[in-house]
Image: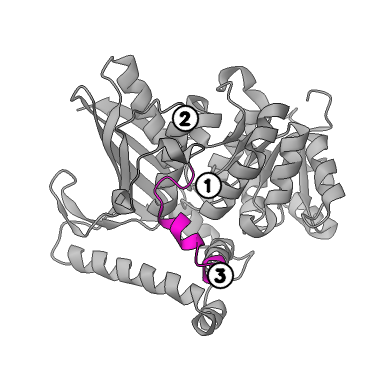
Amino acid sequence: MNEREFDVVVFGASGFVGRLTADYLAGHGPSDLRIALAGRSAERLTAVREGLGEAAADWPIVVADTSEDDAVHALARSTRVVATTVGPYARYGLPLVAACAAAGTHYADLTGEVLFVRDSLRGYADKARASGARIVHSCGFDSVPSDIGVLLLAEQAHADGEGTLESTTLVVRSMRGGISGGTIDSGRAMAQAIAADRSLATVMVDPYALSPDRAAEPDAGPAPDVVRIRRDASVGAWVGPFVMAPYNTRVVRMSNALQDWSYGRTFRYREAMAYGDDALAPLRAVGVSAGLAVGIAGLAFGPTRAVLDRLLPAPGEGPDEETRTNGGFDIEIRTRTTSGAAYRVVVSAQGDPGYAATSVMLGESALALALDADALPERTGVLTPASGIGARLAERLRLAGFTLDVERH
């Protein structure tokens, strides 16, 4: 790998989150790191580079389209790491996964798509292990806070000799930010896929859909993910469903399986959103939950999808700079271990979770894959942030201003 032309290629650099990630690397990557910008349009990539300042002035431009196998394989062979923001990943992502798995190239993305990760795991895990590639999915707000947070809890419990994790719950205390057209397009693509093939709905409700060894997992229905609207005394607030829980929970369970169930065989995990503790809190919880259900149904149904397409941001659009700067998130994950010990981890950061904070998470994931080989888990294949980058990513994010604090309580 040291003989390759580049250390990191940002693929999709002219897209909304791609530009933010490139900007983060320009400001925080080592000056001698060999970075290139890749995408379909040399003109658009050049415009992005010009906006990144002097640090990126000499970054090469690589033109590649996921529909062109030769170009994608050449891209993968040219670099040690690809950080890709090109979605929906189910539509565009697998050719790049295949190329990186074949070339032994490390890979990081921002997917929140269960069906894509399942296809990646089934189709390319063995090839990536054989080549030494780390194919690390979900290196943004989907699903770094969840995945790395639970990893830190498990490592602390193990260090203290308190056994493995059992009941574990993530609660989003606060979350401020916007939404981009790319995120909506990913949701639209999944809804369309399920509408075209109803058998995929069974995959979507399986809590262990992303396990590399599904037969070894519990025979459980969707109940572990379901958080009913109620007042939770341990949280001190009304809680209800969290929009990202159906994906994040599967990623965390995938991490447990990939690490030989080191979190525990009785590990149970779910995620919730806190809605406050005032008189209107239960109404907010009901309203948000109903809105999510209506939105998902609307994207799956042709006539309503056409209306929503006119109202929602288009791919390439996203929240403005003020929204990105003023956003942030505050997450708490609580667990109880097999010995009865209780721990919690707080994960928080300034900046719109899905964009400003996500560009940091993806950027630091790419830097870890490129620069920190000796500090990463030896595991290769199709991986998660916890199983592929591990606690090193927590260290990098702390240095970047994130809070990731574990305590016993």
Q: Quadrant of the C terminus?
A: top left
The picture quadrant where one finds residue 156 is top left
Above or below: residue 229 compared with residue 213: below
Q: Tag on residue 394?
A: 2
Q: Is residue 235 left or right of residue 112?
A: left
Residue drawn at point x = 59 percent, y = 42 percent = 121
Question: Which x, y percent locates residue 153?
Answer: 34, 28
Q: Is residue 287 magenta?
A: no
Q: Tag on residue 358?
A: 1
**Amino acid type at mark 3:** Gln
Q: Is residue 153 left or right of residue 340?
A: right
- Decide which of tag 3 and tag 1 comes sooner along the chain: 3
**Amino acid type at mark 1:** Thr
The crowd level at tag 1 (other Cα within 10 Å; few <14, some 14-19, many 20+) is many
Question: Which x, y percent locates residue 196?
Answer: 57, 71
- Decide which of tag 1 and tag 2 comes sooner along the chain: 1
Question: Which x, y percent locates residue 307?
Answer: 52, 83
Rounded to the nearest angstrom, the CA distance separating label 1 from label 2 is 14 Å
The picture quadrant where one finds residue 10 is top right
- Determine which residue is flagged by label 3: 192
Q: Quadrant of the N terminus?
A: top right
Q: Is 109 in front, or is 320? A: 109
Residue drawn at point x = 46 percent, y = 41 percent = 214
Q: Is residue 271 left or right of residue 367?
A: left
Question: Which x, y percent locates residue 21?
Answer: 63, 46
Q: Are marks 3 and 1 in contact (CB under 8 Å)?
A: no
Where does the magenta region start and end? 193-210
Q: Are marks 1 and 2 in contact (CB under 8 Å)?
A: no
Dot 2: element: helix
